[in-house]
Image: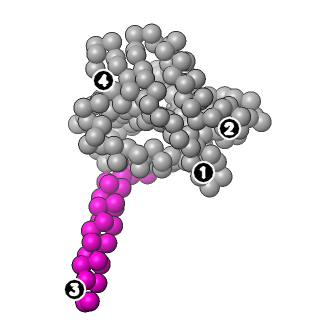
Amino acid sequence: MGKSLLKTLLIAFCLVLTACSAASNLQSFTDSRDGYRFLYPNGWVEVDVKNATEGVDVVFRDLVERTENLSVIISEIPEDKSLSELGTPSEVGYRFLKSRQNDDSDREAEFLSADSREGENHEYYILEYAVTLPNQQQRHNIASVAVSRGKLFTFNLSTSEQRWQQVREKFNIIVRSFSVY
């Protein structure tokens, strides 16, 4: 009985450590002016966005895997609109896909999945895409979308398809850490 209990406790401890290790090595970023926060990996640095596309508020990238990056894009929407009024997770995901394809016809994208989650005071859609760049590089993007104070917030994480399996768990934690207030 004692050995069984000890084994169970040891297994539970190992599971907790495994879950914590995926969330470890993350730092917190807060933009109190625009009202959002998220976690990002150690070793990522903020990139200057002065000449970025309209709406891009912040960009971080990995110092080692330089093509891995995250961004927050803020768009104006009618003040009284909620996320669900913009559509279901799938509808919003397909709409984003179509707008990106119209903006950059050299990229091919495939909408993989859509989900929703409830935060403290806001609803979030989690969207996942496979992207092929003009140079045939395969990318994997995962995004969290939310509405707050008449603004649509899009938090996007991107990596190569080759690295996706290695960073999948951590990226899912990061994308779910995004919150607006």
- Within the image, what quadrant is residue 154 found in? top right
Q: Where is 34 relative to 2, above or below? A: above
Whichever of callouts 2 and 3 sits on the residue coming sooner in the sequence is: 3
Say which residue appears at 26% left-offset and 36% top-offset: 163
Is the N terminus in the top left, top right, bottom left or bottom right quadrant? Answer: bottom left
Where residue 173 appears, as percent x and y from the top left, is 41, 50
Magenta-highlighted residues: 1-28
State how far apart marks 2 and 4 are (Cα).
31 Å
- Callout 2 secondary element: helix
**Main secondary structure along the magenta-highlighted residues:** helix
State how far apart marks 2 and 3 are (Cα).
51 Å
State how far apart marks 4 and 1 are (Cα).
31 Å
- Callout 4 secondary element: strand
Q: Along the horizontal axis of the image, is 109 left or right of 67?
A: right
- Callout 1 secondary element: strand
- The amino acid type of the residue labelled 4 equals Gln
- Callout 3 secondary element: helix
Whichever of callouts 2 and 4 sits on the residue coming sooner in the sequence is: 2
Where residue 29 appears, as percent x and y from the top left, is 46, 48
- Within the image, what quadrant is residue 15 found in? bottom left
Mark 3 neighbour density, 10 Å: few (under 14) some (14–19) many (20 or more) = few
Q: Which residue carries the number 2 mark?
A: 84
Q: Which residue carries the number 3 mark?
A: 3
Residue 2 magenta-highlighted: yes
Mark 2 neighbour density, 10 Å: few (under 14) some (14–19) many (20 or more) = some
Q: Nearer the viewer, mark 2 or mark 3?
A: 3
